[in-house]
Image (cartoon, helix red, strand yellow):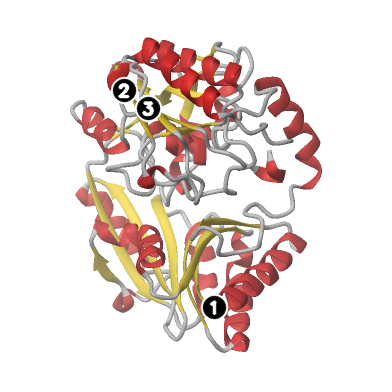
Amino acid sequence: MDGVPSATVTQHAAFADAARVIVSAEFVRAAGATDAVAGIHPQTIVEPGDEQELSAILKLANEYGLAVIPRGGGTKLGWGNPPMRADVVVSTARLNRVVEHAWADLTVTVEAGCTIQNLQETLAQHGQRLALDPLWPERATVGGVLATNDSGALRLRFGALRDLIIGVTLALPDGTLAKSGGKVVKNVAGYDLPKLVTGALGTLGAITRAVFRVHPLPKDARTVSCVAGDLDDAQRLLLAIQDSQLAHSALQLRYAENELPELDILFEATETGLVAQIEQLGSIVAPATLTDQGSEIWKSRQELYAEANSSDMQSVVAKVSVLPSCIAKMLKFFANISVNSGSLRHRAVVQATGLACVLCEGSQANVDAALHRLRTELEHDGGSLVIANQRAGFLSAEAWGAPGDALPLMRSIKQQFDAKGTLNPGRFVGGI
């Protein structure tokens, strides 16, 4: 999609004046250095107080020809391509309420600016949870997690975000508040807007609230780990655990160069059930190799991002998708690239579903070449590689890779929802 034409100083000033009428002057300010989005600096920050104000602000920006970046906790603003423009950041910080927890129906309605941690604490008061473990839950918001489709290892048992969300309200650039889905778990009527906006990176509309199905909190939980002999052994164990009768909630593989791979398995049950499950695991993995781990081990994926942000080297985190049976092949291929490059380091955390976070550190040329080779290999086998986190301007590679045959349809949907390209222009697949 073509970029939005550059806005003038007069347009920015007129927009800011009109925005103050909608949300009051207290919640409109000039952007600062910390408000940059992937190296692009916006002009104005607006914090609406409810979804009607947010909708009015979007309509106003659309009329003035300004590009809008919706922002929640700001934890994933570096994901996707840099925007073509970023005139206005619309923050959901004030849309932070848990609107309704229908605990008897196992549903919750929550505003987009509520953090995942606050949502979980509210649900826990009735012994329930959103069965989701995204990155940085203490800061990540419901809207941001939905927009980036960020889910962790619990996806193995409870499904992805598209399986947990049952309703959404979306503010469109023309000022419309579009609502789809409902508060019941079984809902088949109407346009499936919740699934459409999940993972769309805020390019179709700004999420204002969502409805999720929730699950009971487990009675108890225990994580055990084992060291595999090599990547092929780790692959064998992972598939064997998956093919067994074990009722594990999460399973991941941790791998770093020059280290043996490790598997982590999460069981959630009663104390008696946990003992039985771990005994059964011993028939697949030698019991003597099993070690108890705390829940912190499930933050391994998050640690890759922290390492990338703090490293003295040039660092990139890529999200990789492969068939579970091809995990070892992917990691060995990347290890071979690293060895041949001579100055490339890598680590990976791979979920049993075949979704992986890969940290790659080295010179710009080596990282760029390595990720290009890995992406080409993956796409040839039906997989994918998305550059999830990089320093502004570091790589020449497009974040998303080949868009495939779906791009014309995606462009058509973008045109229908956001004809002027107001929302996050250029950030999504194919420059949408």
Q: Is residue 134 above or below residue 381?
A: above
Q: Is residue 183 visible?
A: no
Tell me if 343 is positioned left or right of 415 in this view.
left
Pick the front one: 209 or 35: 35
Q: First in sequence: mark 1 or mark 2?
A: 2
Q: Residues within 10 Å of mark 2 (few under 14, many from 20)?
A: some
Q: Which residue is mark 3?
A: 92
Asked which quadrant contains residue 64, the reply is top right
Tag 1's secondary structure?
A: loop
What's the distance in space between the residues labelled 1 and 2, CA to CA?
42 Å
Residue at the image position 68 percent from the left and 58 percent from the top: 383
Q: First in sequence: mark 2 or mark 3?
A: 2
- Residue type at the position of mark 3: Thr
Q: Is residue 230 above or below residue 220?
A: below
- Residue type at the position of mark 1: Ser
Residue at the image position 43 percent from the left and 49 percent from the top: 152
Q: Where's residue 276, x and y in %?
A: 29, 56
Q: Where's residue 15, x and y in %?
A: 48, 19
Q: Which residue is mark 1?
A: 363
Pick the front one: 309 or 200: 309
Q: First in sequence: mark 1 or mark 3?
A: 3
